Image (spheres, rainbow, N blue to C red):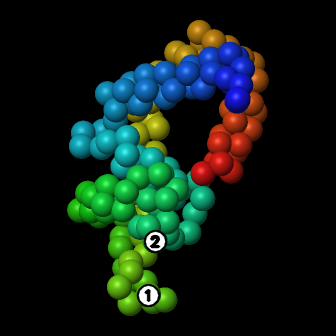
């Protein structure tokens, strides 16, 4: 018979889920017209990690279907924020790269969020926020290994 998870772990994951939901809603409210959180996260992924990606690799990284990722990439491409080109190693595949306009849009999204981030920092304090980052990174890395 398996034991239920420790209450503190459930509470942590529950709070992380609620924070993710609330922050996503808040973020989408202030993003530039026509941008969605899904589109922003793809742009942010490219800026954070650099390089190019296959759509299937992006779908896996974001844990969404290939169709969902294809739709997101099509919208980004139509806006000139990513470029899709043939994958030389796979005649049927494509490679995705962020464009300079995509990098600028990511920065515009972050700039739109800055007043909210400043307010959160003022309310919680920089030390509290900094102290929360390392455990959240460790949690993310643990959950990522379990995929």
Instruction: Tell me the residue that label 1 is attached to.
Output: 90
Residue 102 percent location from the top left of the image: 39, 57
Residue 135 percent location from the top left of the image: 74, 30
Of the pair 131 and 9, the residue shown nearer to us: 9
Q: Is residue 36 above or below residue 44?
A: above
The outermost residue toward the front is 1
Quarter holding residue 125: top right
Residue at 34 percent of width and 32 percent of height = 28
Q: Secondary structure at mark 2?
A: loop
Give the spatial CA distance, label 1 vs label 2. Answer: 10 Å
Q: Secondary structure at mark 1?
A: strand
User: In this view of the protein, can residue 14 be seen by the observer?
Assistant: yes
The outermost residue toward the top is 123
Residue at 43 percent of width and 22 percent of height = 22
Residue 121 percent location from the top left of the image: 60, 18
Residue 124 percent location from the top left of the image: 63, 12
Of the pair 20 and 125, the residue shown nearer to us: 20
Circle 1/circle 2 CB separation < 8 Å: yes
Residue at 37 percent of width and 57 percent of height = 65
User: In this view of the protein, can residue 126 be seen by the observer?
Assistant: no
Q: Quadrant of the N terminus?
A: top right
Quarter holding residue 80: bottom left
**Residues packed near mark 1 inside 10 Å, few (<14), some (14 to 19) or many (20 plus):** few
**Residues packed near mark 2 inside 10 Å, few (<14), some (14 to 19) or many (20 plus):** some
Q: Is residue 30 above or below residue 86?
A: above
Q: Which mark is residue 54?
A: 2
- Nearest to N terminus: mark 1 or mark 2: 2
Q: Which mark is residue 61?
A: none
Q: Is residue 48 above or below residue 31?
A: below
């Amino acid at each position: 018979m398996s034991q239920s998870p420790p209450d503190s772990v459930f509470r942590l994951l529950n709070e992380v889920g609620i924070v993710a939901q609330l922050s996503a809603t808040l973020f989408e409210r202030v993003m530039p017209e026509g941008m969605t959180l899904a589109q922003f996260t793809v742009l942010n992924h490219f800026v954070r990690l650099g390089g190019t990606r296959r759509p299937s690799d992006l779908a896996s990284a974001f844990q969404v279907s290939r169709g969902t990722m294809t739709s997101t990439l099509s919208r980004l491409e139509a806006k000139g924020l990513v470029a899709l080109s043939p994958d030389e190693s796979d005649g049927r595949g494509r490679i995705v790269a962020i464009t300079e306009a995509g990098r600028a849009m990511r920065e515009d999204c972050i700039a739109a969020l800055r007043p909210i981030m400043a307010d959160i920092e003022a309310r919680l304090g920089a030390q509290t926020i900094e102290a929360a980052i390392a455990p959240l990174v460790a949690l993310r890395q643990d959950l990522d290994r379990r995929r």
